[in-house]
Image (spheres, rainbow, N blue to C red):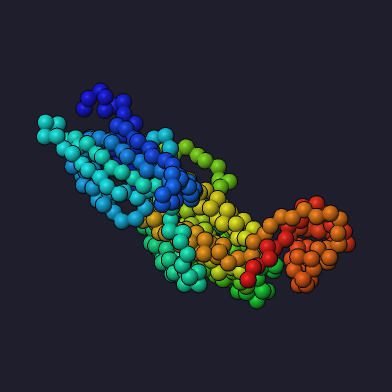
Amino acid sequence: MSLLLLELHKASYRGIDFLLDSCKTTEGRKTVSHEYPNQKARFVEDLGENLRIFEVKGTLTGPLYLANKRRLEDALNAKGIGIFRHPFYGDLNVVVTSFALTEDLTAVGEAHLEVTFAESNINIFPSPAANNQPKINQFVQAMVGEIGEFFGGNFTTQFGDNRIDAGDILTEFLDSMRKNATPAIAEDEDLNTFSGELKTFEDKLFVYIADPDTLSDNILSIMASYDNLGADAEDRLTLNSNLFGFGSDQIPFPVSTLKSREKQNNRDSINSTINGIALINSYNAAAQKTYQNDQELNEIATSLEENYQSFIANNNFTESLLSSLEEIRNEVDIYFADLRITIDKIITITTNPIPLTVLTYKYYGDLERREEILELNSILDPSLISGEIKILEEETA
């Protein structure tokens, strides 16, 4: 390998590394030109910013050249959006529009790559929102099963001390669920049943830990019961959002021996399983919740995305599981995009001192939305309001 190759920057597509020789980035705006017969005139209509096009030249080489070449060809031919990791821009969602691999027979074990990536969003174009909810629920239930299989195959207990550590972590998990399951969320009868399930789990904890598959089944079962405590989608979203982030306060320790590696792997597997299921249950609940206005919808969407990014940065899931998670996230984003078309929009107006009832009647011709405006603005004294006031945009016929 030449010294020049050692100086090149690493890039990757769908996880397959290559060396980046050059990258031409094309940007600009979407435009439509309007021209007129027999006139020296043109109007260029600006339709907004265009996403980037990356024309990449790279080199593929190394001791596993042939295997990596096949993997890269498969990745470049794969359908849909993939992640292009650029050394300066970071991770980019792109679609391959064309590529070429050139092998020079005088340089065995080396290929030159030319590929054009088009930056791409998920499909945000409207589709019937109601049809999307069963699909999201189906994806979530399938992924719960995948997570169970992952945990059963990843959790090990070769060292006795690690069983004790896992028991401590799982006890914290049960305590966290018990703390979140309040009478404000669930009916007393449901809480009593759930408390009984928690007690059974605690009593048989070390029996479960000795058998990873049994432990996996019971974690999934107790989390399903926890999710079902919510009387409606909003309560289920609150329950799972409150559980998400479990294990973030655990103190790191040196990982240098087989015993310590097993301990860390078990902690990562427990935390990833709990937080992964809490996150996808949150997505499922968010797609079934009723939203009053676009502000409420955007707040939930932002919270879910923050949790998603937090989870992506700290988990030990397989690529297959992360792909399933991304698919759920994308489906919920599509559902939200559909909903934004029809949901009530909040706008801000400025008013001189005026009673809330007068302002409400002035904008809507009745007082039906008075309480909504009161809640939107946290108004303490509705007898006289002034300044910037949030109201719901009046629908036009």
Quarter of the figure with residue 88: top left
Q: Which percent across, then down, holds residue 287? A: 54, 66
Q: Is residue 172 left or right of residue 394?
A: left
For residue 203, above or below residue 157: below
Image location of residue 195, percent across then percent down? 61, 69
Q: Give the residue displayed 11% in from the left and 31% down from the top.
A: 106
Image location of residue 6, percent across then percent down: 28, 26
Q: Position of residue 278 (x, y in %)?
A: 53, 60
Residue 154 at least partly seen = no
- Asked if 40 appears above or below 196 in the picture, the reply is above
Extreme residue toward the top, this view? 3
Q: Name the foreground residue: 117 vs 313.
A: 117
Residue at left 69%, top 63%? Answer: 392
Q: Residue at x 43, y 44 (%)?
A: 40
Foreground residue among 177 and 78 = 78
Q: Is residue 242 above or below residue 253?
A: below
Residue located farthest toward the bottom when viewing the structure as drawn: 189
Residue at image position (67%, 59%) is 346
